[in-house]
């Protein structure tokens, strides 16, 4: 019974703050806007705190791996070392300081960019295999559309663009701005409907992702 | 308390011994047992080896010791009479056959019973006197001696309990009138007669009007043909064995427990033969095969890992070669875009109309991994805005966004004469995703508390800086440009701030992959000017290259044009080859089978 | 180029090659590079969150208000309540004290859900629906509009509706729609099945365009990486030469 009351209180809290924030989209009353602003500020602070909690959990997981010398503990040690050095330098010398920016430009930027470059090969390998593995009309339509868009996006070798290249570019524009736009609008509406339903379920305590 | 059978008052059983004169002649059989046990304690224990000699049945008890006739259960009286009669007959037959002295089997049985039960047997005085030769009183158990047989004339009609396996009541008790039997026994006789009449065969009796019922085939197949007996055969009395041990010693027709329980024998059920059809044989065979297949080990197919790695290596080598050739070798060279996209004109027009007294807000909402593309795509846009001298403020909802913004704009600040803190200010990081964007849209001053890379001279309260003094809401900026690689981020900004922009244009600088899902917010051909959420879109390297050409300021977009073109050509060839490979495989598959 | 820049370029080039080695196959160099990335990115994100958000939002107001100012209602609302919420949220690190963070999570989730719902309704559902409805109005189409433009409107409208149908009315496994008719051995699907098929086709086209865009974007980044390696090599050769 006690647990039930507590969970009802938390659900009421989520519903209460959510109602004020949601009403603020449609109603322009002073006290509603004030409450809305307060709750949004608290939520921004809590989001930053949640980020820190997540990082602490990440550190804890890898620390456990190192202390128990599980498989791959050396890599976890590398992670802990890089995390600690970056955090200390960025806190001591500030995130916009030379030391932190040096680490950012030397490690994070090139590593993430290189991962994105590897993605190009992975996408092309998947595209090559698609028709072989799944021979149906939708797969052919997917790959055919991608091919036409690539042909219309990429530059033409040689000198000036010829009529063929211009025609391909126009066809690509028609494909992406008419056909894909229709599908995109339907997808956006579907996503918005789903997000609305999920959000309302959370506000009405049908779903309680925050626990009980 | 009275006896329920005879109605006589029962006397309480007293523990301990009682004097003989205290024992009542009509009761206290326990006391009599005790006295008899004492008297028998000196008897020869080899009562079993007592020579078989004809012994007389116990004589009728004396008058004082005899129990009242009403106390004797009739069924017990009947049983005794029957058995003693049978035993006499057998003993006489044996004597006539083998010269063996006929002995009183009932006495032997009694003695066997006595020997088994020992002194605990009630040995009351007197004994029941059957209609037969008298017997010595001490040869019979006293409890049996007390039971006096009724004279036949005095015996009243009472229910008769037939033997367990026996003949019809008329055969077991010859001369016994049928009207003496209870009703339920009479029903049994009737039922037995009817069964005997029906069992001989399924064929209808001649002259019968009823059609014989036919059994279904599956039931007929289950019929135990060999062991089925149409008539229950009852052995003759003389063939029935006499039980020699246990409390039923001396009785005929007792079910033999020991041979059934102790001795192993084959089950009669197993001896039934079933009629199995061909279809059932086939089904059983099928199940047998299925079970066999389950037990069979399947061979492991050889792995094709090597082929896959080579395949991926080939594609990776082709793409890397295509991209590296223009970088290291300078060729191939691709034609520059001649025609600009339709939306580029609208964007250029928006930038041309920007006021220079209000800062523009650039939102760097992408990860460092996308900086290679978005730095090139947004470069021309930054160049045009900064070329006009519009003050800049940057914001990000990603932790690394401020560092990216600094890296992108640092080179341009020197080129276009911007001074950090006066014409350029980094507002920093906004945590919370959509929540933070909504807070910023409502009240920018309440959401940003600390900037990034602020020069000296900027007050602690960031919003008091000269650049931001006139900014109270989002619509106070001259333009809001969101540079993002993800559709999610673009959608969040369009949803949360789109309705609060007022006359301030909202522009999206996008990665090529994010454009389809952002374009619905931008379709100006279907929206009235005041309802449009996104006022301008810049997406993809071709649009950026066109932009740079229009600005006459070559930038990163044109610098990466040739490697981009070469890489796209390789990608097109790979996809075409994939489609052809798939079609050929499909055609070959159809051909072979 | 300064020494620091040179060292940074060389290190970045080495790390780039370590990541590109994944094209050959998974190897320890790639794993070390990935763990370096995660560690440095996490450390930098934590530092930015603490320095740019939590510090100015929680610590600076207390320092500015002083002990006497802590009891004022405005400080109470803007500082003390967030402090309590943040501390309770921090307790979520340990499973033993995790339940104390539930009220903070409830507030965060409630606000987040309301923002999502409000944005979806006002930013997507209403505008997109109004735009789609307006395209159905013949009076909304200006006279002189070409047939091509009308055809585009029809295509966009059919695409929108069929895509929505595809998501909202998925076929159940237990029952399939009976065909509308069977002609010469070919079964003509019913209206719902036809609409779902058309919706699926539009989705395939949309995702094909997005896939092509992703390929193009990643190729540009690959070009940038190769360009970077070339520049570093030139700088090294220039320095050594």
Image (spheres, coloured by chain):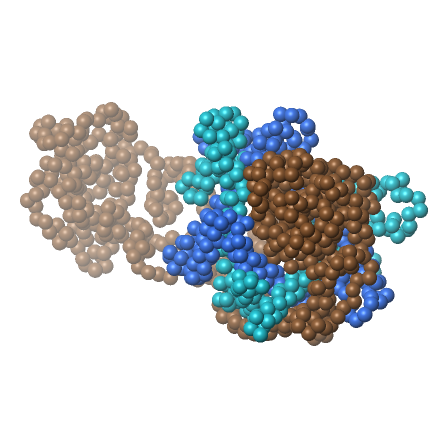
Chain colours: A blue, B brown, C cyan
**As drawn, is B550 to the left or to the right of B369?**
right
Q: Residue furthest right?
A: C144
Q: Quadrant of residue B495?
A: top right
**As drawn, is B193 to the left or to the right of B335?**
left
In the image, B22 versus A95, the foreground residue is: A95
Give the percent coordinates (x, y) of residue B89: 25, 50
Q: Note whether A49 is above or below B414 in the view shown.
A: above
- Which residue sits at x=9%, y=32%? B17
Q: Is residue B439 visible?
A: no
In the image, C199 versus A110, the foreground residue is: A110
- Which residue sits at x=43%, y=50%? A60
In the image, B503 versus B26, the foreground residue is: B503
Q: Quadrant of residue B534?
A: top right
Quarter of the image with the N terminus of chain C is bottom right
**As drawn, is B271 to the left or to the right of C213?**
left
- Which residue sits at x=22%, y=30%? B68
Q: Is residue B305 visible?
A: yes
Give the percent coordinates (x, y) of residue A134: 68, 63
- Which residue sits at x=91%, y=47%? C145
């Amino acid at each position: 019974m006690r647990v039930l009351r507590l969970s009802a209180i938390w659900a009421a809290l989520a519903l209460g703050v959510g109602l004020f924030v949601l009403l603020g989209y449609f109603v322009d009353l002073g006290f509603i806007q004030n409450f809305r602003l307060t709750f949004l500020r608290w939520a921004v602070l809590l989001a930053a705190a949640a980020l820190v909690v997540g990082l602490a959990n990440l550190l804890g997981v890898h620390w456990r791996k190192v202390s128990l010398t599980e498989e791959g503990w050396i890599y976890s040690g590398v992670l802990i070392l890089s995390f600690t050095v970056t955090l200390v330098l960025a806190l001591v010398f500030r995130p916009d300081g030379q030391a932190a920016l040096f680490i950012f430009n030397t490690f994070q930027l090139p590593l993430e960019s290189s991962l994105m470059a590897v993605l190009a090969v992975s996408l092309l390998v998947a595209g090559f295999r698609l028709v072989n593995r799944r021979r149906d009309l939708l797969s052919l339509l997917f790959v055919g559309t991608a091919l036409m868009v690539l042909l219309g996006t990429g530059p033409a070798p040689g000198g000036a663009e010829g009529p063929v290249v211009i025609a391909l570019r126009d066809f690509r524009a028609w494909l992406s701005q008419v056909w894909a736009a229709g599908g995109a609008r339907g997808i956006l509406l579907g996503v918005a409907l789903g997000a609305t339903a999920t959000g309302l379920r959370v506000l009405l305590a049908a779903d309680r992702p925050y626990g009980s | 308390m009275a006896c329920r059978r005879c109605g006589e008052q029962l006397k309480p059983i007293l523990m301990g011994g009682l004097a003989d004169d205290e024992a009542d002649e009509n009761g206290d059989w326990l006391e009599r047992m005790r006295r008899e046990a004492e008297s028998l304690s000196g008897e020869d224990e080899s009562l079993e080896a007592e020579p078989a000699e004809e012994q007389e049945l116990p004589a009728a008890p004396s008058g004082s010791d005899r129990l009242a006739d009403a106390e004797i259960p009739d069924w017990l009286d009947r049983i005794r009479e029957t058995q003693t009669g049978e035993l006499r007959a057998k003993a006489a037959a044996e004597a006539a056959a083998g010269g063996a002295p006929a002995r009183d089997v009932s006495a032997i049985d009694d003695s066997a019973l006595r020997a088994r039960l020992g002194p605990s047997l009630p040995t009351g005085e007197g004994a029941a006197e059957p209609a037969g030769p008298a017997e010595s009183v001490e040869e019979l158990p006293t409890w049996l001696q007390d039971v006096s047989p009724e004279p036949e004339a005095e015996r009243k009609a009472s229910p008769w309990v037939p033997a367990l396996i026996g003949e019809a009541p008329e055969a077991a008790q010859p001369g016994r009138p049928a009207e003496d039997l209870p009703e339920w026994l009479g029903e049994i006789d009737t039922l037995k007669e009817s069964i005997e009449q029906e069992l001989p065969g399924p064929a209808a009796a001649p002259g019968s009007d009823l059609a014989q019922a036919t059994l279904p085939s599956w039931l007929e197949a289950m019929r135990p043909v060999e062991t089925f007996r149409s008539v229950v055969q009852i052995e003759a009395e003389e063939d029935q064995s006499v039980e020699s041990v246990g409390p039923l010693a001396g009785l005929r027709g007792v079910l033999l427990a020991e041979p059934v329980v102790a001795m192993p024998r084959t089950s009669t059920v197993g001896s039934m033969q079933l009629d199995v059809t061909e279809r059932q044989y086939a089904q059983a065979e099928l199940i047998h095969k299925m079970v066999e297949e389950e037990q069979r080990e399947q061979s492991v197919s050889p792995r094709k890992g090597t082929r896959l790695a080579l395949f991926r290596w080939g594609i990776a080598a082709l793409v890397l070669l295509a991209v590296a050739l223009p970088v290291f070798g300078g060729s191939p060279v691709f034609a520059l875009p001649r025609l600009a996209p339709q939306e580029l004109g609208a964007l250029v027009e928006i930038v041309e109309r920007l006021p220079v007294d209000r800062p523009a807000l650039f939102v760097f909402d992408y990860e460092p991994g996308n900086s290679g593309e978005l730095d090139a795509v947004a470069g021309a846009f930054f160049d045009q805005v900064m070329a006009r001298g519009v003050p800049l403020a940057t914001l990000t909802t990603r932790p690394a966004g401020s560092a990216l913004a600094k890296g992108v704009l640092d080179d341009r600040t020197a080129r276009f004469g911007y001074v950090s803190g006066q014409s350029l200010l980094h507002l920093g990081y906004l945590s919370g995703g959509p929540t933070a964007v909504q807070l910023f849209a409502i009240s920018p001053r309440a959401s940003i508390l600390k900037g990034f890379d602020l020069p000296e001279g900027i007050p602690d309260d960031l919003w008091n800086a000269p650049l931001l003094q006139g900014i109270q809401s989002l619509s106070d900026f001259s333009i809001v440009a969101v540079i993002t690689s993800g559709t999610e981020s673009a959608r969040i900004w369009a949803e949360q701030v789109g309705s609060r922009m007022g006359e301030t244009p909202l522009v999206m600088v996008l990665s090529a992959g994010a454009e389809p899902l952002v374009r619905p917010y931008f379709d100006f051909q279907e929206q009235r000017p005041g309802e449009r959420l996104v006022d301008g879109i810049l997406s993809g390297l071709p649009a950026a290259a066109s932009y740079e050409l229009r600005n006459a300021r070559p930038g990163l977009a044109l610098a990466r044009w040739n490697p981009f073109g070469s890489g796209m050509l390789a990608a097109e060839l790979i996809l075409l080859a994939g489609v052809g490979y798939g079609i050929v495989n499909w055609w070959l598959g159809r051909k072979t089978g | 180029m300064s020494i620091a820049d040179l060292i940074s370029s060389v290190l970045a080039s080495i790390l780039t090659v370590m990541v590109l080695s994944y094209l050959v196959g998974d190897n320890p160099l790639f794993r070390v590079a990935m763990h370096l990335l995660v560690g440095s990115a996490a450390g930098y994100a934590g530092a930015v969150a603490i320095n740019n958000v939590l510090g100015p939002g929680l610590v600076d107001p207390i320092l500015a208000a002083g002990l006497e100012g802590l009891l004022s209602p405005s400080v109470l609302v803007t500082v003390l309540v967030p402090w309590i919420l943040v501390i309770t949220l921090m307790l979520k690190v340990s499973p033993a004290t995790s339940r104390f963070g539930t009220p903070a999570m409830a507030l965060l989730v409630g606000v987040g859900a309301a923002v999502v719902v409000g944005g979806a309704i006002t930013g997507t559902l209403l505008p997109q629906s109004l735009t789609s409805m307006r395209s159905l109005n013949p009076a909304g189409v200006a006279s002189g509009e070409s047939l091509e433009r009308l055809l585009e409107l029809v295509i966009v409208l059919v695409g929108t509706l069929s895509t929505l149908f595809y998501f909202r009315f998925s076929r159940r496994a237990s029952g399939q729609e009976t065909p509308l008719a069977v002609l010469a051995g070919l079964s003509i699907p019913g209206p719902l099945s036809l609409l779902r098929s058309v919706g699926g086709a539009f989705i395939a086209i949309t995702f094909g365009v997005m896939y092509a865009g992703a390929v193009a974007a990643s190729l540009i980044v690959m070009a940038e990486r190769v360009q970077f390696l070339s520049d570093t090599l030139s700088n090294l050769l220039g320095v050594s030469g």
